[in-house]
């Protein structure tokens, strides 16, 4: 049962991405092109997603424990600093240029294209590079230990 809930949530998320058009790079780029052929429909998708998240986040903050775990996994890093802003800017530039966000890109493997594989390769390379550059050795060992304990 512990893995069923995340699986179902992932399936619902994937269906939502497909129905909303988030897996279509042209639709995403038209949403981001506010001075050209702007398509505001994804704003409603984002507003709906934020609304659902806010509701669950408020519930989780009031709850004593989650249903399927011993404790909640709240982020320990909550500051807005240069690293966060630069990372968000790079993410946004990549999203705007390619039309792919990481979640919809992975889902789009069902309809592969050269552009998609170029994006996925660049995303994987950037993830590996960022971990090598920004992750301290102590953090890397802790992350590896946590990954091993989950298996």
Image: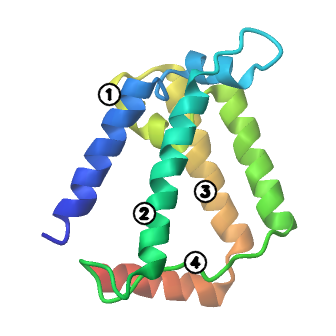
Secondary element type, mark 1: helix
Please give the name of the residue rendered at 52% of the width and 59% of the height, measured from the top-left corner: 54
Please give the name of the residue rendered at 48% of the width and 35% of the height, measured from the top-left corner: 105
Please give the name of the residue rendered at 70% of the width and 76% of the height, measured from the top-left corner: 78
Secondary element type, mark 2: helix
Q: What is the image's colouring? A: rainbow
Label 1 with label 4: CB-CB less than 8 Å: no
Foreground residue among 145 and 25: 25
User: Of the numbered discs in the image, which one, if any, rests on residue 75?
Assistant: 4
- The picture places residue 70, in percent across and down from the top left corner, at 30, 89
99 with respect to 8 (left or right): right
Foreground residue among 62 and 150: 62
146 with respect to 87 (left or right): left
For disc 3, the marked residue is 127
* Mark toward the viewer: 2 or 3: 2
- The picture places residue 32, in percent across and down from the top left corner, at 71, 25
> Real-space Cα distance between discs 2 and 3?
29 Å
For disc 2, the marked residue is 56
For disc 1, the marked residue is 110
Q: Residues within 10 Å of mark 4 (few under 14, many from 20)?
A: few
* Mark toward the viewer: 2 or 4: 2
Secondary element type, mark 4: loop
């Amino acid at each position: 049962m512990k893995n069923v809930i995340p699986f179902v949530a992932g399936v619902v998320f994937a269906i939502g991405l497909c129905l909303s058009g988030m897996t279509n790079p042209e639709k995403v780029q038209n949403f981001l092109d506010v001075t050209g052929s702007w398509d505001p429909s994804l704003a409603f998708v984002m507003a709906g997603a934020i609304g659902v998240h806010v509701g669950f986040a408020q519930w989780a903050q009031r709850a004593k424990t989650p249903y399927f775990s011993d404790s909640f996994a709240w982020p320990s890093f909550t500051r807005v600093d240069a690293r966060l802003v630069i990372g968000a800017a790079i993410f946004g530039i990549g999203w705007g240029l390619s039309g792919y966000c990481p979640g919809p890109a992975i889902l789009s493997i069902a309809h592969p294209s050269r552009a998609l594989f170029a994006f996925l390769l660049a995303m994987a390379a950037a993830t590996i590079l960022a971990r090598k550059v920004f992750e301290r050795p102590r953090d890397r060992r802790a992350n590896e230990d946590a990954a091993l304990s989950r298996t």
